[in-house]
């Protein structure tokens, strides 16, 4: 569910007409709904009620500080995957005790930053990383709380580029080696082992792979406790999918997910953390773009937009589907026609949709890409020297630009031409 609905023939973001935002900030742009962000956070929080838990938003999905502050003020923790994300979360006011640090390639500098600023735990992904973290912590006179990310070798049944829980993926340690790796960690002076971490992939539309992975984590918890380790926290990762295509069966809800977590892990008396990213931010954002031209090709019409793959790369990168809807509501019974929806970038991959059925559109019409809040703005680039597009946050009848569009000068002046060129 989201807060982008038609009212009186116009698309609104909460109580603000999307066309008003377009008039104020220009196109293309991203717009997020505060109410949707908070609704999704609270759904997860409530789904785990009765268990000691923390919802740590995976901020790589959408990391604008206004979004982080919105969620952080509601009580969310953050899952960060770089020193930059750690700093951004802290700048948005999230305390270190609510930040977990994930990622396969944490550097010594990043570890130092987090240990100095405060951290809830590191989710460690390899033995070399364990040794590095221990050495860094010892050198600072600190002890780093850790979980170890296990790779449960479960097929998440999602797009190959976002599956992370099979043995061929780079993530975590093979679960079969877990007991040896935990024994190794227990011998490192700078580490305090407190739990287990698992994250099997993104955009999962079925609970079965989660349950298979969590069952393995439950068994491992019992085994590791028998080996003498303290396992008091289980980080269960993120990954719950969202309904990009409204005609498909809806993925499970956070409530169903929460019930499954309680069923598989509740008896272990552990504190649980979850790291949803997409489900919190995905449907909380639109990308709004304007038609530049309608071009008739051979046997097809192209809708050429001012937004492109550099602004929203998901269709090019993951073959992702996004609903694309007109900002002016089509009248009931309006005939639809097929369009290839493309951007101006000089690559054939700059195609958002092929033969998409839409009502007739003309130059200057506005369209909105639904479910663009997660892995949208954060993955954008300035390819083709197209300035990063602005981000806007709506709350009720208020809206504000939360990241401005750089001017052409700002973009161009980031280059330096050495005098010897
Ligand atoms: C990307 C990621 C997440 C979030 O995944 P979503 O599919 O957006 O929920 C959570 N945890 C880790 C370790 C990740 O890498």
Image: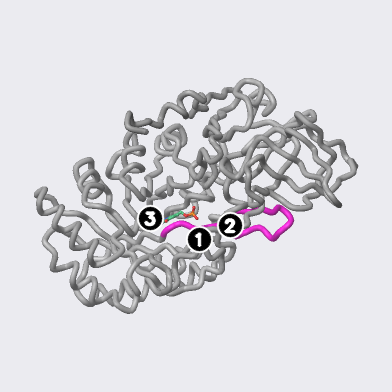
Q: Which residue is mark 2?
A: 318
Rounded to the nearest angstrom, the CA distance separating label 3 from label 1 is 20 Å
Mark 2: which secondary structure? helix
111 or 265, nearer to the observer = 111
Residues shaded magenta: 237-252
User: How far apart are the alpha carbons under marks 2 and 1?
Assistant: 9 Å
Q: Is residue 19 left or right of residue 92?
A: right
* Contact between labelled residues 1 and 2, with CB atoms less than 8 Å apart: yes
Residue extending farthest to the top is: 24
Q: Is residue 232 left or right of residue 1?
A: left
Q: Is residue 347 shown above or below 134?
A: above
Q: Residue at x 25, y 52 (%)?
A: 107
Quadrant the C terminus occupies:
top left
Give the vertical position of 250 relative to 378 (above or below): below
Please name the residue that numbered disc 3 is placed on: 273
The quarter holding residue 167 reads bottom left
Q: Does dot 1 land on a helix, a strand or a loop?
A: helix
Q: Residue 162: which disc? A: 1
Figure quadrant of residue 371: top right
91 and 56: which one is in front?
A: 91
> Mark 2 CB in 8 Å range of ligand 1?
no
Specify the farthest residue to the front.
420
The residue lying at 42 percent from left, 62 percent from top is: 199
358 left or right, relative to 161? right
- Say whether mark 3 is within 8 Å of ligand 1: no
- Residue visible at 23% across and 76% down? 180
Is the C-beta of the residue carrying label 1 under 8 Å from the nearest atom of ligand 1?
Answer: yes
Residue 55, numbered label: none
**Can you see residue 391?**
no
Nearest the viewer among 304 and 214 is 304
């Amino acid at each position: 569910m989201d807060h982008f609905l038609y009212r009186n023939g116009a698309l609104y973001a909460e109580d603000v007409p999307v066309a008003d935002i377009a008039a104020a900030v220009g196109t293309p742009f991203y717009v997020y709904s505060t109410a949707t962000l908070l609704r999704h956070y609270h759904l997860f929080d409530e789904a785990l009620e009765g268990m000691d838990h923390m919802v740590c938003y995976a901020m790589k999905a959408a990391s604008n500080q206004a979004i982080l502050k919105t969620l952080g003020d509601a009580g969310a923790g953050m899952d960060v995957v770089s020193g930059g994300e750690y700093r951004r979360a802290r700048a948005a006011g999230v305390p270190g005790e609510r930040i977990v640090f994930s990622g396969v390639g944490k550097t010594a500098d990043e570890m130092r930053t987090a240990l100095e600023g405060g951290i809830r735990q590191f989710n460690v992904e390899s033995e070399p990383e364990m040794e590095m973290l221990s050495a860094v912590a010892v050198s600072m006179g600190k002890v780093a709380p850790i979980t170890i990310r296990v790779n449960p070798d479960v097929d998440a049944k999602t797009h190959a580029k976002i599956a992370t829980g099979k043995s061929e993926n780079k993530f975590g340690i093979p679960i079969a080696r877990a007991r040896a790796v935990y024994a190794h960690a227990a011998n490192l002076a700078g580490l305090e082992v407190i739990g287990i971490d698992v994250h099997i992939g993104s955009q999962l539309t079925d609970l079965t792979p989660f349950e298979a992975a969590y069952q393995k984590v439950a068994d491992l918890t019992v085994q590791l406790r028998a080996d003498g380790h303290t396992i008091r926290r289980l980080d269960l990762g993120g990954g719950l999918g969202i309904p990009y295509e409204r005609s498909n069966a809806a993925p499970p809800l956070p409530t169903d997910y929460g019930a499954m977590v309680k069923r598989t892990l509740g008896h272990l008396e552990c504190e649980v953390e979850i790291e949803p990213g997409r489900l919190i931010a995905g449907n909380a954002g639109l990308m709004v773009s304007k038609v530049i031209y309608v071009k008739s090709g051979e046997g097809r019409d192209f809708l050429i937009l001012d937004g492109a793959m550099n602004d929203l790369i998901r269709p090019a990168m993951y073959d992702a589907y996004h609903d694309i809807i007109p900002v002016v509501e089509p009248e009931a019974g309006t005939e639809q026609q097929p369009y290839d929806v493309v951007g101006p970038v000089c690559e054939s991959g700059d195609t958002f949709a092929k033969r998409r059925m839409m009502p007739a559109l003309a130059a200057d019409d506005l369209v909105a890409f639904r479910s663009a809040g997660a892995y949208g703005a954060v993955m954008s680039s300035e390819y083709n020297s197209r300035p990063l597009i602005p981000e806007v946050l709506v709350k009720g009848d208020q809206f504000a630009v939360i990241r401005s569009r750089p001017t052409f000068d700002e973009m161009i002046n980031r280059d330096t031409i050495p005098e010897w060129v």
